[in-house]
Structure formats: C-alpha cells, structure tokens
C-alpha cells in the first residue's frame, strides 16, 4: 500500500529542493497503545509559500496486527494563515480474493500523543 498526504500550497517539484528526513518513531495513542513506524519530515526553507513550515507524515503499525495507520502534522511557521484544505491518496495491493480486503477511512476517536 502506498499513501500520500498533501497541503494545498505544496508544489511536488519544489519538494526536491527541500530537506527531507526519515526517522523511526514510536508514538502512543490516547488509549495507551504503542505504535511503531516511520516519520517523513519535510522542512521548508526554499519554497516561498511554505518557508518555515514543517510537514510530518507518519506511517505506523502495531506489531502482529495487519493495520497501517497514516496521518500527518503540519507546523505552520510561515507567519501566514494557511488553508486547511488537504488531500490524501492511497494505492492498495489487495488479495486475489476481494473478501480478504477491507479499507476503512474515518475520523477516528484514536489520537496520537
């Protein structure tokens, strides 16, 4: 499965000029469950529209569970109010038997601390 998030003012071509880092992370949710995975961080220094902003995409799972949780955080340090319009896209590689595939998109009660 591939998943992407985005902020309205993000220019995909301009991302190539920005510093992008990937770190292994552990996050606890509001129910005390430990999630492990990766965080992709883009620190905007070149793009004039987003200069100063920090954009983090998280891809987390719990050991032994076939679940991938993905979400993002946007730290707006630009000095301007940015639109709250975002987008999410995903590409899924499913099982040959469609009965074995489930996708659930929601605004969950689960929050990460």
Image (cartoon, helix red, strand yellow):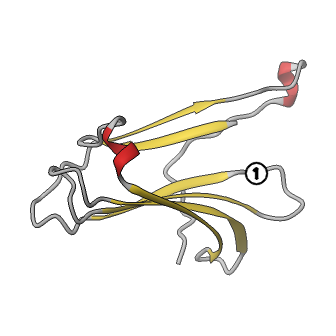
In terms of depth relative to the viewer, which is nearer, 7 or 104? Answer: 7
Count of all numbered marks drawn on residues in the image: 1
Tell me what residue is drawn at x 49 percent, y 51 percent: 107
In the current view of this chain or complex, which residue is farthest to the front?
A: 17
Q: Is the residue 90 above or below the residue 56 in the image?
A: above
Packing grade of label 1 (10 A; few <14, some 14-19, many >=20) is: few
- The residue that appears at 20% across and 59% down in the rendered structure is 51
Judged from the image, the secondary structure of the residue bearing numbered disc 1 is loop
Q: Is residue 58 above or below residue 8?
A: below
Above-or-below relation of 84 to 29: above
Whole-percent x and y of residue 81? Answer: 12, 58
Query: 29 above or below 64?
Result: below
Looking at the image, the residue that sits furthest to the left is 80
The answer to whether 107 appears left or right of 36 in the picture is: left
Tell me where residue 1 sits by quadrant: top right
Give how far across and how far down residue 68 sits, in percent. 70, 51
Horizontal and vertical percent for residue 56?
Answer: 45, 61
**Which residue in the structure is indicated by mark 1?**
67
* Residue found at x 89% / y 18%: 96
Residue occupying the point 23% across, 42% down: 9
Query: Which quadrant of the figure has residue 74?
Result: bottom left
Residue 87 screen position, x and y as percent: 39, 38
């Amino acid at each position: 499965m591939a998943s992407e998030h985005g902020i309205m003012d993000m220019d995909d071509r301009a991302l190539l000029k920005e510093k992008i880092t990937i770190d292994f992370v552990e996050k606890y949710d509001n129910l005390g469950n430990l999630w492990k995975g990766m965080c992709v961080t883009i620190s905007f220094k070149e793009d004039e529209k987003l200069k100063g902003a920090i954009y983090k995409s998280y891809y987390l799972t719990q050991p032994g569970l076939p679940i991938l949780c993905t979400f993002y955080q946007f730290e707006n340090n630009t000095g301007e109010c940015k639109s709250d319009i975002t987008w999410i896209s995903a590409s899924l590689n499913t099982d040959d038997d469609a009965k074995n595939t489930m996708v659930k998109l929601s605004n969950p009660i689960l929050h990460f601390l």
